[in-house]
Image: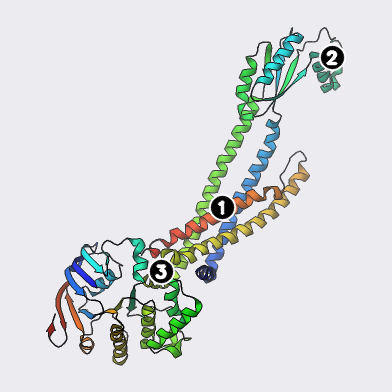
Amino acid sequence: MIEFKNVTKRYPEGKIALDNLNLKINDGEFVFIMGDSGAGKTTMTKLLLREERVTSGELWVGDVNLAKMRASRIPKYRRRIGVVFQDFRLFKQKTVFENVAFALRVVGGASAAEVKTRVMTMLKVVGLEDKANNFPAQLSGGEQQRVALARAIINNPHTIIADEPTGNLDPKLSMEIMGLLVQMKEYGKTVVVVTHEAELAKMFHQRIVRLKDGRLVGDDIYGGDTL
Amino acid sequence: MRRLSDAFAQAFKGMFRNGLITFVSIFVLISCLLFVGSFALIALNVAYNLEDVTDLNEIEVFLDFDADDETVARVQREILRLGNVSDAIYVSKEDGLDDMTGEFADYGYLFEDISDEENPLSDKFRVLYIDNDKVTTLDYELKQIDGVRKVNSRLDIAATVDSLQNGISVIFVWFTALCTVVCMFVIINTIKLSVYSRRDEITIMRYIGASRTYIAAPFVLEGALIGVVGATAAFFLEKLIYSLLTGFVTAQMNIVKLYTYAEMTPTVLTVFFGISLFTGVVGSLISLGKYVEA
């Protein structure tokens, strides 16, 4: 479960990015976070990744209050979160296999055989098992994002955070990626997708949280079921 | 094990990725080490030769002119009881005169008229002591013994040698510190370039949950490798320079004693690898700065 309790985030220069935000996301839920530029979406992502610390309030992810978590515990925390970025952030000089395997190696503990099995399984989930030896530059944008998704889920995280995952993709590929993210919900993952593509979000009939000027202004499932 | 080999592989790649700046770093490191090393070798050899001056470790203790056998025996006992004394060799005034006659053989006519009865010298002891640092105390203690007329110690020489050695040590420490700072500055910039060229990878690693150690290891190893390469090259270059210099000095000045490079090797290796590994590792850690922050 993710819970924002009266969370305010004020940057050093004085800008208030999130203003007393209260939001609860249950385990296994799929949520779109939407809003215009400057609404606080990116700040929310940064707080969830513990890249930034809340100014006041509490931010719970499972049994961890990120507001009070020590810096030394951040790497371990992030291994429980899968993250997907708009610009994919793949290692250009590594193959698809190596990119996905890298996340396993960082955590350590897996034998070479186990790494191979798990990476190939993940590539199969995202439909790229035949591209394992390709380099990112040899893939389309959608395929690169699927590699990023495979990397995000290989350590079996309980939560996946996707920050504008379809921002660099055409509509068809965007549908594909969103479809895969929704599929993650079926695997029991909590999925938080930050996007500004309202039409795309509506097509998946999932919970949509709307932010404006750092405040919660909407929380519903497209179709009118206000939560 | 796999992580360590990965870190080494990344470190090697980093060295070659920044080829020119890595080369410059190693070159500067070698230059600094050669300066420090050459100065250290000179300082050690100077100290080695200065030891001869103080190594005489001998004080002459002259007895009263009318000292009888009993006084001589008592004074010897009292001298040998002192803590810093290893031996007290008795030299009668007759033996003293013989020594002086032999020493000034070319001026033998000066001693022709001096008979044993008219011997102007007094009996003395050649007191051999152990610790040069405590010679002032010994000098004072010897003067307090009843029957002792005069004490000839080399306090002035000991003081000069001591201040000379201290001066060399101070210069060496400052010189080493200065070279260490220069090396560190160069290595910091090299590793900064390496970190900058891999900043995107570092960002990805942080988001995936890589620990600080995991992220920092390749860069720290890169710094250490630069240090090891620099120290190794400097060691052999120093050996070459030293053999050329010792050959020249030995040919010109037979009186000068010099350490062999083999005798100096442990010192040179400790100084070279100490400085280079310290600058490499600490320089890398400083360069990483905010990049490894979570």
Residue A92 seen: no
> What amino acid type is highlighted by mark number 3?
Ala
- Give the camera-side residue of B235 and B242: B235
> What amino acid type is highlighted by mark number 1?
Gly
Residue pointed to by mark 1? B274
Q: Earlier in the sequence, mark 2 or mark 1?
A: 2
The quadrant of the rendering that contains the C terminus of chain A is bottom left
Residue B218 seen: yes
In the rendered image, the residue lying farthest to the bottom is A172
Residue at 74% x, 7% y: name it. Answer: B66
Camera-near label (1 vs 3) is: 3
Q: Position of residue A114 (x, y in %)?
A: 47, 79
Residue pointed to by mark 3? B210
Chain for mark 3? B
Q: Which mark is residue B111?
A: 2
Q: Secondary structure at mark 2?
A: helix
In this view, B170 is above or below B89:
below
> What amino acid type is highlighted by mark number 2?
Phe
The quadrant of the rendering that contains the N terminus of chain A is bottom left
Whether residues under marks 1 and 3 lie with C-beta atoms below 8 angstroms apart, the answer is no
Camera-near label (2 vs 1) is: 1
Q: Earlier in the sequence, mark 1 or mark 3?
A: 3
Q: Which mark is residue B150?
A: none
